[in-house]
Amino acid sequence: MFTGFAGPVARADINPALLNDKPAFIADVMRQMTLEEKIGQLRLISIGADMPQPKLLKEIAEGRIGGMFNTVTRADNRPLQDAAVRNSRMKIPLFFAYDVVHGLRTIFPISLAQASSWDLDAIALSARTSAMEASSDGIDMTFAPMVDITHDPRWGRTSEGFGEDPYLVSQIAKASVRAFQGPTLPIAADRVMASVKHFALYGAVEGGRDYNVVNMSPMRMYDDYLPPYRAAVDAGTGAVMVALNSINGVPATSNVWLMQDLLRKDWGFKGVTVSDHGAITELLKHGVAKDEREAARLAIKAGIDMSMADQVYDRELPDLVKSGEVSIQEIDNAVREILGAKYDMGLFHNPYLRIGNAVDDPVEVNADSRLHRDAARDVARKSIVLLENRKQTLPLKKAGTIALIGPLSDAPIDMMGSWSAGGVAKQSVTLYQGLRNALGNKARLIHARGANITEDRHIVEYLNFLNWDTPEVTQDKRSPAAMIAEAVKAAKQSDVVIAAVGEARGMSHESSSRTSLDLPANQLALLKALKATGKPLVLVLMNGRPLALNWERDNADAILETWYTGTEGGNAISDVLFGDYNPSGKLPISFPRSVGQIPVYYNHLRIGRPYTEGKPGNYTSQYFEEPNGPLYPFGYGLSYTDFSLSNVSLSSPTMARGGKIEASVTVKNTGARDGATVVQLYIQDVAASVVRPVKELKDFRKIMLKAGEEQVVRFAIDEDKLKFFNAQLQHVAEAGEFNIQIGLDSQKVMQQSFTLQ
Ligand code: NOJ
């Protein structure tokens, strides 16, 4: 290894006198570091077969590793930290990161489900609890929130994000970052640093195929896809994880415009940037680097501070510095951010801040007593969306005989959804267990599997290949007909049938892109057989993306979209099924009728020949074989009560520059039950210098109303809410008319207009 720039070799000490002056402290540490030690800080390493513990300990002691991920207990992390602060020359602590996306030990609903709550406090509770659990297991940083907007439900990672809307996802991004990190710097011992991901535009991969290219106009980028990352940066995220995809021909990992002009200069990001897994090496595959040396050079020059799980910085940077192709300032810039992040995590003050002393280690990390079940149940029931409820099929009575059928009715692994971190499947409350808990001996529960997730052998192989520890999907060896026969028999003996159908969690996962949004054929066959019994049919869907639910919508008596509800899922779903909780979720993403319609998203741009509902005809923008528009629109979701909107009004028909007006609406609970709903404010720019969306969400309020109660909801509208990026990418509000639309979903709205002067 090149040693030409080697600095002092004597054992260095962290100078405690400087500890309260971050820049001076970091400058003092850096002054003492050798080039090798600096490059070592740029490496983020995962423990694994290629990095067994003895090798790790050695490299840490040599000062060649800056951070670790995928090691998730205090007992595992302590010897690694010991190696860094006791055995390395510079004694620089490691940090420990992990994908704590929707919980560590207690698994909360997946992100898409959480977004369906439209409840920022609930989402913050998930992040706050995740931070508590992660920090108490020795973790300093989470690779979350994942705020990639997507318009393409074929993309498996749709489940990991918060949906299609830039405003909603931005609000969630802010709430999550604050909840993970807390209000203080250095970050408190019971919080963790956030690493917002994946910067940028990862959700727009072409065709919804994971890791594919992204090509996008600048206006769409700035208006629709970038705002959530920006919101996370404004909320103070300590880290940014860089996306695997290319953007208009340049991989994010080597993208100088993205990493420097936009992130650092325009947005003023001060923190550490981390590549995604192996992404620097993948620059060769993208075809922008001819070898690893060039890949390392491109990445460091673009501003990728830390390289996750590849060795190219370690191997190539020393010589690149020696040859002058990479300057020591470029290395220093990255090191400064990494040390700055460690400082902000509180690790220089106390490297064992989240690792603690061995005497305090939990005896059993997965002990049930360590779980936050109440919080998980609370968030889970708020995340469930009622899509259909004919003849008030729901809520069900806790009486009579209930048949529970379906491959997801007792599926502990699937309850957790993808990226379930340290979650333990057997701690999940399945729907079967949840119903048992709710019913006690008040009603008879008959259970039959009814179908496998799929009978497609290739898909089963794929799903089991995703997880090498335990089989994700276990096949019932009986024939589909035999399983259906058993289910039909159970249904016939019952007063109502609950069918838990959908996707195995691996179907909505990283790399799990689909070409179909239908339920697997064998599950649909099961539903058809159940329907034929004539018993009321309640679908409980578990899935990580919008599905094309045409038959289901027309034939089920009730449909609950539960996504993947997490550790307490079965209890939460039962709460909703029996009316102990009145559903209040709203879709954060449009549901298409078919794959052929994709992309379907509510805030699409206006066009010259729009299709008008109820006015079919040629030469308008439509698909002629099926109805147009989504099956279920963005913002949609029913309740066991009804709400009415009236008196949409504006405080003034004009808004002065720099001024404000107020929109108000009266919301009444006209039904017989207490319930919550989400009042949504959309704005449409009537005529602008560029083509603008048909409407855009600009505010929302989740309110709880008692039966018969009414409330006036007020929204402040200022110029900021009218702004967009024009053709010159200036963020402007243009004078003229605006329509204000208020509704309980994005389609059924009441409108008023005003003029910006
Ligand atoms: C790859 C994924 O894209 C990213 O989201 C995750 O944080 C890293 N692997 C680390 O597990």
Image (cartoon, grey):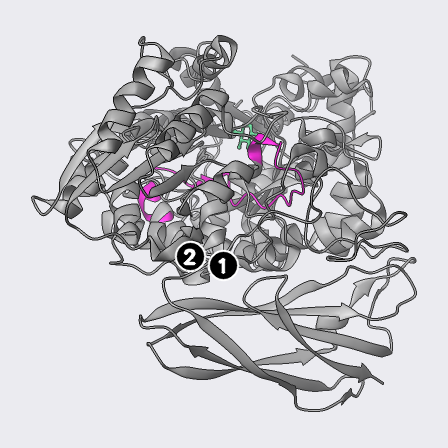
Query: Is disc 1 in contact with disc 2, using a CB cutoff of under 8 Å?
Result: yes
Residue 88 seen anywhere in this rendered image of the structure: no
The foreground one among 118 and 194 is 118
Q: Residue furthest bottom?
A: 652
* Numbered marks: total: 2
Residue 667: horizontal and vertical position, in percent?
48, 79
- Tell me which segment is drawn in magenta: 131-157
Quadrant of ligand 1 in image: top right
Tell me the crowding category of disc 1: few under 14, some 14 to 19, or many 20 or more residues within 10 angstroms, Cα based.
Answer: many
Label 1 secondary element: helix
Instruction: Identify residue for label 2.
Output: 124
| Three-letter amino acid code at the position of disc 2 | Ala
| Three-letter amino acid code at the position of disc 1 | Ala
Residue 261 seen anywhere in this rendered image of the structure: yes
Residue 12: horizontal and vertical position, in percent?
48, 33
The foreground one among 30 and 533 is 533
Q: Quadrant of residue 292?
A: top right
Residue 198: horizontal and vertical position, in percent?
62, 39
* Image side of residue 572 versus residue 274, left or right: left
Which residue is pictured at 27% across the width and 58% down the height?
Answer: 579
Instruction: Identify residue for label 1.
Output: 175
